[in-house]
Amino acid sequence: SRQEEHVSSTTSSRAQAADGGNKVINLDHGNPTMFEGYWRGTGEKSTILIRGWESMSYFSDLGNVCWFLEPEFAKQITRLHGSVGNAITHDRHIVVGTGSTQLFQAVLYALSFPSPNASPQQPISVVSAIPYYSSYPSLTDYLKSGLYKWDGDAYNFTKDEPYIELVTSPNNPDGFIRQPVVNRSRGTVVYDLAYYWPQYTPITSPADHDLMLFTFSKITGHAGTRIGWALVKDKEVARKMTEFIILNTIGVSKDSQHRAAKLLQVVSGSSEHMGFPEDSERFFLYAYHQMTQRWERLRDAVRRSGLFSLPEFLPQFCNYFGGFTEPHPAFAWLKCEGDIEDCESFLGEHKIITRSGRHFGVEAKYVRISMLDRDEIFNLFVERFLDTTNHALVSG
Ligand code: PMP
């Protein structure tokens, strides 16, 4: 029964807590479960009901370039960007995807597809400045496409050929705001703005690029809903991206779009001061406070360790909060400062699983650590991290 399930899961988490010293702490993936508490608190407000006969058709809006985009979801995307002020939606096509992971591939397809009657082409180079998001190389190359290929660090790109540059801002893994680095006339820049939300970074101006990718996963934490969207200026690019998604999955789950629409409605409703919600009900403020506390605790532990360092950020004026805020990235980009050359192995010996800098195109002295796991895991991590460094100092 449900009751038994609840009891047994509570018992097992108690057992785990008691055995916290042995537990493997996996902070390799950026699984954003830390906002669960907020969503529990919203109760019925964030619940949707889908009847058996609803959302059966493949089609959502035949008048739209992206005809599988649910109009209510599109409305909530526009509303959210408007209330947060992080992106211009005016004069843009919205393309929905199964996570921004699918949209990334749709973008590569759309930008590299040869025009009719064009002579045979070499695969277009896809580049991103180090340290880059570790999934870009494999997502680009896993199908060995004849249209595009991964060409590594954008700082090393000097060819006089068409290229696609990925700009992740704030960046995964290091949290810095980024600009394109190649700046040649034959390139197209794709902005991956997965983390351009007020809990992670000050919102200094609305992003106004031709091609911008967003993911639902990192805004509200609902990675399992598998929803992302692209804001696309050029209609032909939007049409080609839509074509990719039709070939790939004939559209995107309507059930997921309905759920995402509902959750975004709750987020925007909580931000727009309608009905003067309590501060703790304001999603971005809640999430910002959570991130602030976690970063303070991690910075304190790193300072006490004397073995590691973290990136330093300057506060900036956040238009959304109406005051100065500091970046609190979704990942900690930790560097081993001492003799330890392989930071992933060092932490791994203490059962802390992280992702080595090598996956991001840099040295193994760096690791990426997810800051978005549940409280219980984060607390265990900080404790273990301090033990690790005490142990290293004692044993020299
Ligand atoms: N881009 C970046 C920079 C990311 O960090 C992630 C998630 N780790 C994604 C895209 C993919 O997100 P989604 O869950 O929407 O596929």
Image (cartoon, grey):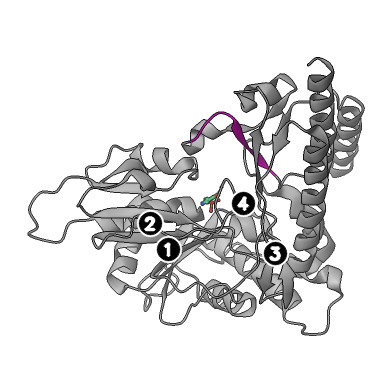
Q: Name the residue tied to disc 4.
A: 223
Label 4 sits on a secondary structure element that is helix
Q: Is residue 84 left or right of residue 357?
A: right
Residue in the foreground of this view, choosing between 204 and 41: 204
Q: Name the residue tied to disc 1.
A: 58
Q: Earlier in the sequence, mark 3 or mark 1?
A: 1
Q: Earlier in the sequence, mark 3 or mark 4?
A: 4
Q: Position of residue 206 (x, y in %)?
A: 54, 75
Q: Does the segment drawn in magenta span residue 363?
A: yes
The quadrant holding residue 9 is: top right
Q: How far apart are the two marked residues, 1 and 4, measured between alpha carbons? A: 23 Å
CB at disc 1 and ligand 1 closer than 8 Å: no
Q: Earlier in the sequence, mark 1 or mark 4?
A: 1
**Of discs 3 and 1, which sits in the foreground?**
3
| Residue type at the position of mark 2 | Ile
Q: Position of residue 244 (x, y in %)?
A: 33, 56
Label 3 sits on a secondary structure element that is loop
- Marking on residue 315: 3
**Of discs 1 and 4, which sits in the foreground?**
4
Q: Can the viewer see residue 199 in this picture?
A: yes
| Residue type at the position of mark 3 | Pro
Q: Name the residue tied to disc 2.
A: 250
Asked if the residue at tag 1 contacts the one at tag 2, i.e. Cβ–Cβ closer than 8 Å, the answer is yes
Question: How many other residues sit within 10 Å of disc 2, few (<14), some (14-19) or many (≥20)?
Answer: some
